Image (cartoon, grey):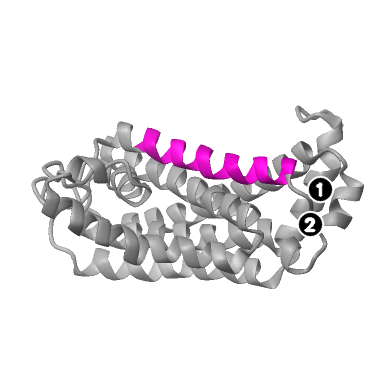
């Protein structure tokens, strides 16, 4: 069998893949996320009026359900990443895993590669379902062009990034539940509070460097162009990738240097 992967990386990858598709919560996510997207996109496509290029989102009101599906995919990917990376600490199986994969770099690489690949696959399914609903119920109500393609690409990037951010937090903290709580708490409470404080202090540009703001700008792709809290989409993508590299890299370093 021809493979582009190093031979020594294949066994840990196979192990992580088996863990990913055999756990019931992951199978539930694989069903629930497309279902949420289908319902949300169908409803907004049916209820929306004609596309208005001056309104937000720029892809038309009919596509709002697709954005909701992407948000659900981001949260689902964060949950998946945290549980996939941190569950071995919960069940104290990490030392045993390390016995079979003595190179910790390969161990973490396998985890992160599988997490990112599964998150990407789930995001593709979610977006295909959303597009099918738009084509079926939102003809003439949505701009099918470069902006929509940018939204879809930004959604894929955001889903993968948040799966790896959550995974990095889980291995750094050695707790999947705490990693999930931090992600949800930051996005739902902490960052919005920072937005309010920064706005009051006249530091709106600072907010563009935060992961939540970068995620919105990455997925919105041209919507809200006058917002001081959102960077242009290309810059936001770079910010989000840097956050991913920093958090995932910190988790990787923790596995390499700390006792299991």
CA separation in Å, label 2 and label 1: 6 Å
* Element marked by disc 1: helix
Quickly name the residue at label 2. Answer: 18
> Magenta span covers which residues?
237-257
At which x and y percent is residue 255? 71, 46
Q: Taking the image as drawn, is residue 21 in sight? A: yes
Q: Residue at x 47, y 50 (%)?
A: 159
**Is 25 in front, or is 210?**
210
Q: Circle 2 sits in a helix, a strand or a loop, which is it? A: helix
Q: Residue at x 75, y 52 (%)?
A: 17
Q: Residue at x 34, y 52 (%)?
A: 212
Q: Would you place residue 25 above or below residue 19 in this image? A: below
Residue designated by label 1: 14
- Name the residue located 8 percent from the left edge and 46 percent from the top edge: 54
Which quarter of the image is occupied by the N terminus? top right
Asked whether, in this view, residue 197 is left or right of residue 101, the answer is: left
Residue toward you, 42 or 245: 245
What secondary structure predominates along the stretch shown in magenta?
Answer: helix
Q: Mark 2–mark 1 contact, CB under 8 Å?
A: yes
The stretch drawn in magenta includes residue 238 = yes
Q: Position of residue 97 (x, y in %)?
A: 85, 53
Q: Position of residue 214 (x, y in %)?
A: 33, 44
Label 1 crowd bin: few (<14), some (14–19), many (20+), radius 10 Å: few
């Amino acid at each position: 069998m021809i493979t582009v992967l190093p031979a020594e990386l294949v066994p840990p990858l196979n192990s992580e893949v088996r863990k990913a598709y055999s756990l019931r919560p992951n199978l539930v996510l694989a069903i629930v996320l497309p279902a949420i997207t289908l319902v949300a996109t169908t409803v907004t496509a049916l209820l929306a009026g004609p596309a208005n290029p001056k309104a937000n989102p720029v892809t038309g009101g009919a596509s709002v359900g697709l954005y909701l599906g992407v948000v659900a995919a981001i949260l689902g990917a964060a949950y998946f990443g945290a549980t996939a990376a941190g569950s071995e600490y919960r069940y104290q199986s990490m030392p045993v895993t390390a016995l079979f994969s003595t190179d910790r770099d390969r161990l973490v690489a396998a985890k992160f590669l599988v997490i990112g690949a599964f998150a990407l696959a789930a995001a593709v399914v979610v977006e295909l379902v959303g597009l099918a609903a738009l084509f079926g119920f939102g003809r003439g109500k949505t701009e099918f062009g470069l902006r929509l393609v940018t939204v879809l690409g930004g959604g894929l990037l955001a889903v993968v990034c948040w799966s790896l951010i959550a995974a990095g937090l889980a291995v750094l903290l050695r707790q999947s539940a705490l990693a999930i709580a931090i992600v949800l708490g930051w996005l739902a409470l902490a960052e919005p509070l920072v937005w309010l404080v920064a706005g009051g202090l006249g530091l709106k540009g600072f907010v563009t460097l935060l992961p939540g703001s970068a995620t919105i700008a990455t997925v919105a792709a041209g919507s809200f162009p006058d917002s001081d809290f959102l960077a242009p989409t290309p810059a936001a993508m770079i910010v989000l990738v840097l956050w991913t590299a920093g958090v995932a890299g910190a988790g990787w370093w923790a596995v390499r240097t700390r006792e299991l």
